[in-house]
Image (cartoon, grey):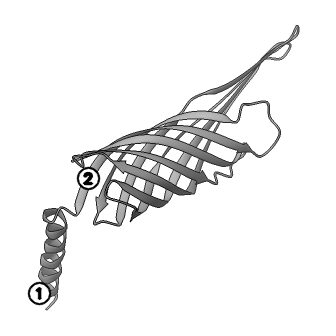
Amino acid sequence: MKKLLLIFSLFLSTNVFASIYTNNNFKPYLGIDFGINIANYNYQTNLDDLYYSLTVNAGAKIGHNFGVEFFFSQSSSNDLEYISESQARNHEFYYQAFGFDILAYYNISKQFDFFTSFGVANYITYNKYECIGLINEQDKLKENDVTTRFGIGVIYIFPGNKISGLFQYQYIPINNELINTMSEFSIGIRYTF
């Protein structure tokens, strides 16, 4: 009986995935996004709150209203230098992130989709201090923070249905030592296979 249930469940799941793929309901894609991130710091700092990021992603649209996307993101380095007669200080901060988002699509027209997203990501932040003067100090703090992400956006599907462009907003509550939250505005392209 157990073997029969196992064979039946394998057969059923294989048929379901085959029907999703053959009915053109499974659309894998690759993409790249360019983002502008605005950080909300936990305390007063002279670091600029604006970061640029580049994100590479791979995902799939499953059916008309559901999708999943995996991503890797790298931010620009945010540097702060202070030089006086007795000392020089350098403060550098940047982050890397990887994770996945689950997307829900809402069709607006033939070429436009509105979407919402919810995801989980691992943000690795690098906070590096260097002080040169009477006392030379160096410190590099690396934090690993798993957090959620919430987003909304709009996708324009170009004629031919292979290439699409998107604009999205992501809210990220990082809550680590330096950054409380981050807002990301990004534009990107997707190539669907």
| Among numbered discs 1 and 2, the one appearing first in the sequence | 1
> Secondary structure under badge 2?
strand
Residue ID at (86%, 11%) = 84
Residue 12 position in % (x across, y down): 15, 78
- Which amino acid type corresponds to the residue marked 2 in the rendered image? Pro
Instruction: Check the image and name the residue furthest to the front.
Output: 109
Q: Which of the pair 144/82 is nearer the observer?
A: 82
Circle 2 Cα neighbour tier, 10 Å, few/some/many (<14 / 14–19 / ≥20)? some
As drawn, the label of residue 28 is 2
Q: Amino acid at mark 1?
A: Leu
Residue 127 in the figure: left or right of residue 62? right
* Rendered residue at 62%/47% (across/down): 183
Q: Is residue 121 above or below residue 143?
A: below
Q: What's the residue at 18%, 73% (across, down)?
A: 16
Q: Of tags 1 and 2, which is closer to the observer?
A: 2
Foreground residue among 151 and 57: 151
Above/below status of 152 relative to 81: below
The numbered disc on residue 4 is 1
Instruction: Give the quarter of the figure containing the N terminus.
Output: bottom left
Image spot of residue 160 (x, y percent): 21, 46
Q: Is residue 77 above or below residue 142?
A: above
The picture places residue 5, in percent across and down from the top left corner, at 16, 86
Tell me residue 94's x, y (percent). Answer: 60, 33
Residue under the image location 44 percent in, 59 percent down: 114
Q: Are marks 1 and 2 in contact (CB under 8 Å)?
A: no
Q: What separation in Å lies between label 1 and label 2 (alpha carbons)?
A: 33 Å
Does residue 22 appear to the left or right of 139 in the view shown? left
